[in-house]
Amino acid sequence: MPPRATRLMPIHGEDKPITAPMLSPERIASVLFASGEAAYSWNCASDVLEWSGNAPAVLNVVSTEQISSGRAFAALLSPESTQNRHDAIFGDQRRDPGVGVAYEVRYALKQSAPGQVVWIEDAGRWFAGADGKPARADGIVRNVTERHRREQELKALSQSDPLTGGLNRAVLTKAIADEFENATKFKTSFGFIVAAIDDLAYCNQTYGYGVGDQMIAAIAERLRTHKRGKDLIGRFSDNKFGIVLHECSLEDLFVAGNRFVSAVREAPFETSAGPLSLSVTAGGVVAPRYARDAGEILAHANIALEQAKAAGKGSFADYQPPRAVAPHGEGNKKAG
């Protein structure tokens, strides 16, 4: 039996195609405003930018005169921006297949008050002219300042230790890998130090974990005040801090390690239980001289830390590879 042809159900008793009503320009503008978006069309040849009427409100500018051309709009870009519409379009190596080429960028626009910016999400399509180059771009902009702020806060939280406000272990571990790659590539060296708080368990038992946390945060802050500009400090574990020393020689490592341990013991820390003193013991390693990868860097820094602990609390030791041991009996051989 041949298949039965599908028949559309009639609407209001009529088999007629339904034509949806079209939004008027005024209604489109109202919808854009309600959604917090503004539309634009950029004539790339003449540099004229045409906007929907709500654009000044979305972009937080005084009038459309400030954004009437691509050049004028570019002048509003904040130095914080790493992207812009011009580069997204004219830097695109793709060809327009006839329906345009999609792009999406995020950038910041300067505001009248110094230091203030509005973050904009810009999405659209550029269309090629007869020469294949961008001739027109149509798109939508949206103010995403609040979303950008929340994203930056979440990013900062994901990278920081909640107690000290410094970097966390994951970020430090990545920094070690990055430094190792750069040092290997450019034939330089860097250092890594592990600094452990001495007697933190005793502090917790005697004064409570709240005071112990205050000591951890205070020691972290003091360590930060004694680092160089490009060095990184973060919390590596409960009672340990990791310190990445950018472009560091063996001599630099020794100086920095002793500077950190001395800084911690130079003065008591104010806590809710009164002034308290604790020390840190630290060990460090220079790479790639004494470590072949990130794993060895961590292992050798901890070996140096154990050597420092053996020397006494508040000490620093730098990693030195074990000396080669002569084969058994070789030292008793006589010459000739």
Image (spheres, helix red, strand yellow):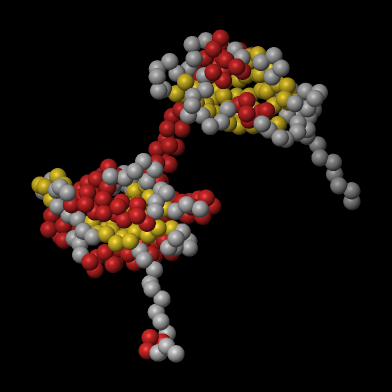
User: Residue 131 appears at what percent x and percent y?
Assistant: 80, 25
| Residue 335, placed above or below residue 21 | below
Classify residue 300 as left or right of residue 224: right
Quadrant of the snapshot with the C terminus: bottom left
Classify residue 89 as left or right of residue 179: right
Answer whether residue 171 is visible to the viewer in this image: no
User: Residue 147 appears at what percent x and percent y?
Assistant: 46, 32
| Residue 295, placed above or below residue 52 | below
Q: Residue furthest front?
A: 336
User: Residue 83 appears at what percent x and percent y?
Assistant: 56, 31
The residue located at (62%, 25%) in the rendering is 86
255, 266: nearer the viewer: 255
45, 310: nearer the viewer: 310
The residue located at (48%, 29%) in the rendering is 80
User: Residue 45 appears at what percent x and percent y?
Assistant: 71, 17
| Residue 253, placed above or below residue 21 | below
Answer whether residue 288 is visible to the viewer in this image: yes
The residue located at (57%, 18%) in the rendering is 73
The residue located at (47%, 52%) in the rendering is 188
Q: Specify the quadrant of the image occupied by residue 18.
A: top right
| Residue 285, placed above or below residue 56 | below
62, 258: nearer the viewer: 258
Q: Residue furthest left?
A: 274
